[in-house]
Image (cartoon, helix red, strand yellow):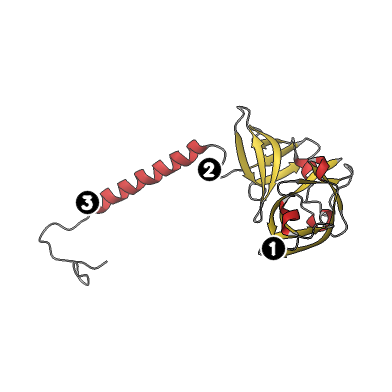
Amino acid sequence: MQLVVARIGRAHGIKGEVTVEVRTDEPELRLGPGAVLATDPAEKGPLTIESGRVHSGRLLLRFENVRDRTGAEALRNILLIAEVDPAQLPEDEEEFYDHQLIDLDVVLADGTEVGRITEISHLPSQDLFIVERPDGSEVMIPFVEEIVTEIDLEEQRAVITPPPGLIDESEAVVASARDAQDGEQAEGQDGEQAEEPGAEPADGQRKGDA
């Protein structure tokens, strides 16, 4: 099966290098020198990777027969597509290929339906599940163990324990309002304990001390 493994970004320098937005957990395998990748649009490929390096946290690639900035800019926004055996699994049991995660049902620990994974976004800091809600809206779920507690491929579901406000903005609003109310109550209590005008300060404390 064919999977998108990267999207080409802007040109870097004048020797044909391009930045890429990585969309695979195994860039060293899918985007290594010698890899031949199909493209979308198809007429722009196939492209063969000549070399790659990391610069300022971004992966830079150079393709065969692309030698200048003009050629690199012509590749901007092209998707790179690898042929992947659907039966192939990552060596690490806790890692997953994107195609294994797409279309999984996302549920809370009590079984409440959240939505369906439609896309995996690979960011420099972490991966995100793009989840379509039953009402058609989307929510982004960080793919970290503190939030995604279980991936069950047999049951085709991902179990999550989201913090307040992640999937329901009203929860964040309620929490904020509660904090504000608690703050007002605390301020009122402090006011009741304030010294009366003209009263002497407590021993060891001068008026105006913090």
**At x 76% / y 54%, what residue is drawn?**
71
Say what secondary structure mark 3 lies in.
helix
Label disc, if present, on residue 95 of the rendered structure: none
Is residue 108 in view from this perspective? no
Q: In this figure, which residue is indicated by the disc labeled 1?
A: 13
Q: CA distance from mark 1 to mark 3?
A: 67 Å
Q: Is there CB contact under 8 Å for labels 2 and 3?
A: no
Label disc, if present, on residue 164 of the rendered structure: 2
Q: Is there CB contact under 8 Å for labels 2 and 1?
A: no
Closer to the chain start, of discs 2 and 1, is: 1
- In the drawing, does residue 207 fall left or right of residue 112? left
**At x 87% / y 42%, what residue is drawn?**
86
- In the drawing, does residue 202 fall left or right of residue 174? left
Q: Is there CB contact under 8 Å for labels 1 and 3?
A: no
> In the rendered image of this protein, does residue 158 appear above or below residue 95?
above
Closer to the chain start, of discs 1 and 3, is: 1
Closer to the chain start, of discs 2 and 3, is: 2
Which residue type does callout 2 highlight?
A: Pro
Query: Which mark's residue is nearer the viewer, 2 or 3?
Result: 2
Which residue type does callout 1 highlight?
A: Gly
Which residue type does callout 3 highlight?
A: Glu
Outermost residue toward the left in this view: 198
